[in-house]
Amino acid sequence: MPGLTSDTNSQKLSGYRFYEEVLGSPKYVVAPMVDQSELAWRILSRRYGAQLVYTPMINAKMFASEKTRKGYRDQNFNISNGEEGGPQDRPLIVQFCANNADQLLESAKFVEPHCDAVDINLGCPQYIARKGHYGAYLQDEWDLIHNLINTLHKNLSIPVTAKFRVFSTVEKTVEYAKMLESAGAQILTCHGRTREQRGHSTGLADWAKIRAVKDAVSIPVFANGNILYHSDIEECLRITGADAVMSAEGQLYNAALFAPAQSSSTSLSSPLAFDKGLHPPHADLALEYLSIVKGLKTKTPMSAVKGHLFKLMRPALSRETDLRDRLGKVRNNDKAIDEYVEVVQQMKARMERDANEVESVSAEELVKIDPATRLKVLPHWLAQPYCRPLPIIAPQSTGMSSPIPRQEEDGEMLTGKRPHSEMAREFERPVDEAKRARVGSVPAML
Ligand SMILES: Cc1cc2nc3c(=O)[nH]c(=O)nc-3n(C[C@H](O)[C@H](O)[C@H](O)COP(=O)(O)O)c2cc1C
């Protein structure tokens, strides 16, 4: 089984040998996502085709100083229950943000026996990253970055990897990627947006820059950005030449993003006619997710649960406003999961009712093209990407046939409620999704 190298003294593999022999040559990767790529979501994602998953970013400074930050470790990577990093949670890469090599190493040593690699977040562009001096705000301090990577490279028994954003020029991006490789990174994830591409200016990821990185280094490269539909995956791999595709938002709205459509099925839950991928009924995905949450000993933060439910069921929430309000009102207590299950079961019944009403209509006829985004809109009971209408001018080299309006990246304004940990609270500044839904679909990029 890929991803289980519990003998930390075993020979440390590097680059492609690590990618192939330990990770099992994954092509479909779920991104690190604060308060969203938690254990329960990772388990669901693997059931639907994800071959490698990252943990949410963990702050190495807080993780290392467990004495002062009581409980932070348990909340962010629970080892005592044996589930995080256990057999059903591999292959797994644990991501940290850091600006101090000692704190990073101490934190990494703690998770080392329970994951396949440790990743360093060099891509977070949020205000909190600037304040905390990490993520994309280290991008200009190459000596510091070199030291962070190299310290883990020399002192860990598992590989170190790095996730970064591109610079405005191809030349600088390539030079940077080579520096990360020379410091000891064994896989690079290249997010094809610059540090400045955030909020209203998010725009499209530049696949040509990812291609240039791939051509310049000898280690595996994961391409990140612009994946909305399953059909984008092959296109991205072809254009970038990358070894794998990493998705964040697209996969949050459709946990089955990486699963191919079932060719034998003609049902609406597998609408082959307009996409090669699987778009299950979102209420089914939501119920499956909740049953995973219920079955785990490890506590799933309620903020994560709420965030997932709002995203998964988004296509129907503007119609089923009473259910949306009920979702928003669920409080964080012992009964919360059962209350969520009740709401989702009602959603499921209503969605089945709607699907039955158009049973005789073909899947093709039910798919609309959004005039503003020129993207496909599937029937409202199916999991699908959420696209906000925005006036975005596509750069030349994205490889995409139509402009893709982006959502806030790195969690900003995406989840339903404030995340559980202090780190995540700082990292994410979400607008209450229920509130957002009440004012309609427009203020998606507030
Ligand atoms: C909810 C959310 C949380 C995120 N948290 C992290 C994180 O913890 N670490 C990180 O490196 N990137 C984080 N990101 C950024 C994604 O990993 C990814 O680089 C970015 O969203 C672009 O990919 P996409 O176009 O597939 O969404 C986050 C993104 C989202 C949507």
Image (cartoon, rainbow, N blue to C red):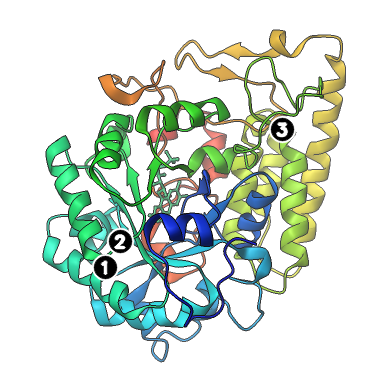
Q: Toward which corner of the image does residue 87 lie, by quadrant?
A: bottom right
Q: Badge 2 is on which residue?
A: 185
Q: Toward which corner of the image does residue 275 lie, by quadrant?
A: top right
Disc 2 vs disc 3: Cβ atoms closer than 8 Å? no
Q: Toward which corner of the image does residue 295 lie, by quadrant?
A: bottom right
Q: Please name which of the two marks, 2 or 3, marks the residue nearer to the observer.
A: 2
Q: Residue 177 versus residue 429: which sits nearer the camera?
A: 177
Q: Badge 1 is on which residue?
A: 149
Identify the image quadrant of the N terminus: bottom right
Label 2 and label 1: CA atoms lie apart by: 6 Å
Q: Residues within 10 Å of mark 2 (few under 14, many from 20)?
A: many
Label disc, if present, on residue 418 of the rendered structure: none
The structure residue drawn at horizontal position 29% and vertical position 70%, both measured from the top left corner, is 98
Q: Please name which of the two marks, 1 or 3, marks the residue nearer to the observer.
A: 1
Asked whether residue 175 appears in the rendered view, the answer is yes
Q: Please state which amino acid type lies under the numbered disc 3.
A: Glu
Q: Please state which amino acid type lies under the numbered disc 1.
A: Ile
Q: Is residue 369 left or right of residue 240?
A: right
Position in image of residue 42 (x %, y %): 61, 56
87 above or below 342? below
The structure residue drawn at horizontal position 45% and vertical position 61%, both measured from the top left corner, is 18
Mark count: 3
Identify the image quadrant of the C terminus: top left
Q: Is residue 269 left or right of residue 29?
A: right
Callout 1: helix, strand or loop?
Answer: helix
Disc 2 vs disc 1: Cβ atoms closer than 8 Å? yes
Label disc, if present, on residue 320 of the rendered structure: 3
Callout 3: helix, strand or loop?
Answer: loop
